Image: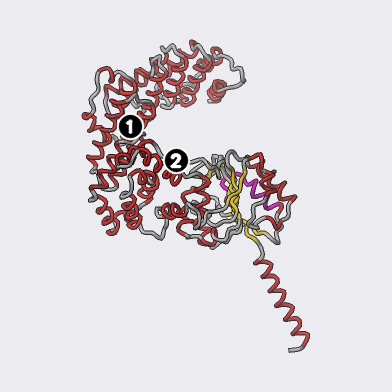
Amino acid sequence: MSLSAKVFLLAALLAVGWGADAIAGKKTVCTITVNSANEKDAFRKYLPEDKYEFVELVERGRPDWLASACRQGVRCDLLVISGHFDGSTVFYSDQVAASEFLPVAELERVSCSNSCPALLSGLKEVYLFGCNTLNAGATKTVSPEVGRSLVRAGYSHADAEQLARKLDQRHGESSRDRMRRIFVNVPVIYGFASTAPLGPAAGTLLGRYLHASSNSEVGSGRASNRLLGEFAAESMIAVSGSSESDPGAAYRHEACQFVDDRVSPAEKLGFIHDLLHRDMAEARMFLERIEALFASLSESEKSAPAFTQAQAEIAQDSVARDRYLQFAEDADQPQVRARMILLAGRLGWLSPAEQRAELVRMFGDLLGRRSIGSAEVDLICSLNKDQELDQERHRLSLSPAQAERATHAAALACLGSADARAHVLQALTSRDDADVQIAEIYLWHRPITDVSELRALASGIAHMTQSAAQVRALETLARHRLSDREALEELERLFPAAESLEVQRAIAAVFIRADRQLLAKPEIVRLLSESRRKSPGGDDIIDILIRRLQAS
């Protein structure tokens, strides 16, 4: 080979090497955009292409986009998540047509399972653009039943209070705690302690920082005081991911037991059995995670021999069963007690018949020991959505005075009592707004399908004299999408006689949802136009209704 050829070959090899080094030196900015793209666009605009490469992980219309990114081995130096955040469970979009979202539980599963090391393990910085992404406020706290359980277990009151405080510190996780556990060992996590700026505002502030700063600062793994300064009025803070030396490392290990893909369902159930041997107060703090595990299991997983064996071992543990059910009975919140009863069935501690009996016994305690409200009525109807508890209604015994209350009647109606249902329907047209609200909750679960009931209800509403209660009753009626001419005529007569604009608007809402063919008549349009009370704010739902009827 000639000298000139050797020089050319050496130059080519060096060029290839330099190119590879340049590519290797690029930082990869991974973006998860479930709402506005303003933050991503700001990074793209100000970070030079020769130093930063961008990868959008969300594939529109594909529900498994995160898993797809993991399979592709995408390696990220920076991660930017943009979306509304509910403060605990999910990043989501405010766009009606958008179907993409990011559950925090899925991030937690990926982190705990180490199933996507390229995506997470090399991260230097994470940017969480959403409200309360790093809020330090606990999302759950130890309730009073925990202290009572500890006293029953033999602790003194002082020791029980001290242990309850420790449980609160250990289990009262915040969104900040959860993000730190997900992005373990990440040097810098940016987020918001409270309200975050909307996308356009966040993009502007981010652009101002990027335009004025040195590019080498981005992705360095060191918190930027300049960036925090730009967002100082917007509650932005920076924290680091958790590490093995953190006080919460042991809790992270236990929380991961529920979602780590490397742990079999049978092993997870065995871990739950171990939890049930601890103070029941601590086991109670894992209730949500235990429920989520059972909800995630397929039928084949639940029927696997190893799983059924682990479940049988729990079912035969009578000591843990008795402690658990005693704790459930003492729960302060009926929703928690109901959840614990349902979980007892999944653990094999209650047969279907025993489970039904326990739930109805809880209903009896609610009806007999305390005044109940809409939340309890909602709970009873929800638990009996398949009407299997109707057969247990005979276990309840109410005094005549109790049976006259709208709340108690609604509870019995949720359990299939026809007499109680008639009482609740009458309550919907009463002068008492609280009774109307109870009836509204009940009918949300048990809507009217009988035309005679609808006609009677429309007539009763037309004769109501209390405006606020009448509006609520009309809102309830609107959800039934009336298609009965006689019921609609009652409201037509009520419209010109209505004493407030709010009542007329509520009637218009009923008409908008009703069968328009029954209303599209010139005389009805004329009635609405001539009898309507003027809206001080301009066009409202009555005007919209008139225009729609005119166009029909």
Residue nearest the viewer, comparing 335 with 198: 335
Q: Provide the secondary structure element on which disc 2 rests.
A: loop
Q: Is residue 221 above or below residue 545?
A: below
Residue nearest the viewer, comparing 489 with 453: 453
Tell me which amino acid carries mark 2. Answer: Lys
Return the mark for residue 520: none
Q: Residue at x 37, y 40 (%)?
A: 160
Is residue 86 shown to the viewer in this render? Answer: no
Kindly identify which residue carries mark 2: 140
Q: In the rendered image, which quarter contains the N terminus?
A: bottom right
* Residue 446 belongs to magenta span: no
Kindly identify which residue carries mark 1: 380
Look at discs 1 and 2 and give the one toward the viewer.
Answer: 2
Residue 408: % across, % down: 31, 23
Q: In this view, does 271 lie above or below 168?
A: below
Magenta span of residues: 31-45
Q: Quadrant of residue 548?
A: top right
Q: Is residue 392 left or right of residue 126?
A: left
| Comes first in the chain, label 1 or label 2 | 2
At label 2, counting other C-alpha atoms closer than 10 Å, the crowd grade (few under 14, some 14-19, many 20 or more) is: few
Residue 272: % across, % down: 34, 51
